[in-house]
Structures are given as structure tokens and as C-alpha cells.
Amino acid sequence: MLPKKKVHPKVKLELHPRNKHRQRYDFKALIATYPALAPFVAVNKFGDESIDFFNPEAVKALNTALLKHFYNLGFWDVPKGYLCPPIPGRADYIHYVADLLAEDLDEIPRGSAINILDIGTGANCIYPIIGHQEYGWHFVGSEIDFKALRTAKKIIDKNTSLEGAIELRLQKNPRDIFRGIINDDDRFAVTICNPPFHASQAEAMKGTVRKIRNLKHSKEVTTERNFAGQSHELWCDGGEAQFVRNMIFESVHFGKNCRWFTTLISKESNLRGAFKTLKKVGAIRVKTIEMGQGNKTSRILVWSFLSEDKPQDWSDISSD
């Protein structure tokens, strides 16, 4: 008996309305843009064209095709073993940040006067790429991994559309987040961050195996490291909760340099501790933005030490 065809919605309503990836992947169009994707595309048991999302090479090929097709990139590549993030979810964060900035200006601000700080930009440089191509914003990307920074620079240098749009800064002290990155005269409209989620390598491996078992509906999953990502991309002491706590405490010293601080929160239970810390440090404005990605819900935690006065000049966002 043939398997019952799975019915997929034509539009992914959980994604942001401006997200270019709300429609199902058009593999014919993507292959036309990036022919190297073709060997990874096959008809699955439900009769749909797809790729094997457990194959890192297939995911990398899909990402390359998406970035070329939707974001006008001529070149994109990441070294083996580095994080290859899902493009639709990363785009959602950028679009919700645009909405956040629109609250202060009554419209979505566009152009290079909008300066964004991406904490942990990674070898993939995804957030700056999408943010600049969608809204023309200028980005500063920080990173503790020199190899990742070198790869990100290669991506920037090989794409004329990114020329002058992204500045990269090396974080020399891995214990710091904003210190050593934000200069006294820097003014950022917003900071963004996708913090390491797990507290240890063992926890990261356990979580990955559990995720694959759920997706494959099988207990026969190896415990070998079968996920992409370097250690600092996936885990840190204390996990997401501690990282965000450290970020909040450090943000106090840069409250006049940044209109908004934001970070992704994957685990809802971590919000309570974050709210307590924000109250302790005297954040003036605090909010959360929910994002839906498939069956998963994640959140953007937002805070500011500045008043609600609308900025007159985005190059000096701390002015009253």
C-alpha cells in the first residue's frame, strides 16, 4: 500500500508576513539559480520534492541556493563543522527587529544610518546579510572565533552587494559580550544575538539525538556528534540562561550606546530569570516578541535603558 500523501500548507502562516520563505520551497527555481543543489533534491515518501535535512551538505546547498535566489548573493560558504542555520527563522528575527524599530519611528527605517550590532555573527554571517539586503542597514558583527570571522570576511569581500555594509570585530575576551566591541562613540539602533543554548557538549549531543529521534520517529540514532556547529556556537557554562544574564548585566554599561538590546530565548522557562535580572538592573522598557517556526515557538527578549522619546537622528539615538 502506498503511503498516504501528506498535505502541506501552501503558506507557512507562522512566519512573519514579510518573510520571503512563507511559501514552500520551489526547488525547480532554486536549482535554476544554484544547479549544485540538484543532486540533493529527491521525491520523498509523501510524493514531495525535498532534501535530507540530516545531511549537512544538503542543508548547506539549500542555504546557498536560498541566499543566491532571494538575497542576491554571488558567493556564500561555511567551513565544515560550522553552524549552517535555517534561513527562514533567521529572516524572521530580522523582520521582527524592523517592526520594533518602526514603533519608534512610525515606519520601518531603512538605509545605512541604521546601525545594528550582531553578537556572535558566526562564519555564516546570516543576520547581517539578510538585514542589509532587506532593509539596507549597516551591521557590526562580533565574533570570538578568528576562523569564523575570516570566513565571514570572505563572504563580504566576494559580494559587491555587501560592500561597506558589514564591519567585523574580533572579541578578544570570550567572557565579554559588549566590552571590547562597542566603542564610546558607537551608536546602535539595536543589538541582536542568538545565544548558545546548551550548558555542555554532553547536553548538546543529548538534545540533538532527542530531536532526531522525534523527527525520524526512530530510537535507532547514533550518539556520535552528528550536528553542525562549533562549541561556542552551541554551548557555554550555564547555557542560555547564564549567557543572557551576563548579557543583561553588561548591557547596563552601554545603555546610551544602544537604543534596544535584544536576544533570542529558546527556552520559555528562562524568561522568568531574565525578567528578574532586567528589573534588578533598572531596564526602563522590557518586552517579548513571539516567533513561530513550524511546531516550535521561540521568543525575542527586548529591553532598553532609554526613554520612549522618538529619536530625531538615528546616528545619535541616545539624544533626548
Image (cartoon, rainbow, N blue to C red):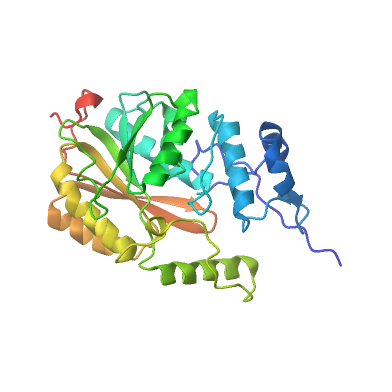
Q: Whole-percent x and y of residue 159? A: 50, 27
Q: Whole-percent x and y of residue 182? A: 21, 39
Q: Whole-percent x and y of residue 255? A: 16, 42
User: In the figure, is residue 261 to the left or right of 22?
Assistant: left
Of residues 119 and 136, the one drawn nearer to the viewer in this rendering:
119
> Vertically, is 162 above or below 56?
above
Of residues 257 and 156, the one drawn nearer to the viewer in this rendering:
156
Q: Residue at 48% x, 72% y: name it.
A: 206
Whether residue 109 is visible to the viewer of this picture, yes or no, is yes
> Vertically, is 188 above or below 314?
below
Please identify the quarter of the rendering in which residue 196 is found.
bottom left
Which residue reaches farthest bottom?
A: 219
> Vertically, is 248 above or below 92?
below
User: In the figure, is residue 47 to the left or right of 56?
Assistant: right
Q: Quarter of the image containing the N terminus?
A: bottom right
Please identify the quarter of the rendering in which residue 212 is found.
bottom right
User: In the figure, is residue 89 to the left or right of 267?
Assistant: right
Q: Whole-percent x and y of residue 132? A: 42, 30
Q: Residue at 45% x, 28% y: name it.
A: 157
Q: Quarter of the image containing the C terminus?
A: top left
User: In the figure, is residue 160 to the left or right of 242?
Assistant: right
Whether residue 48 is visible to the viewer of this picture, yes or no, is no
Q: Residue at 48% x, 24% y: name it.
A: 161
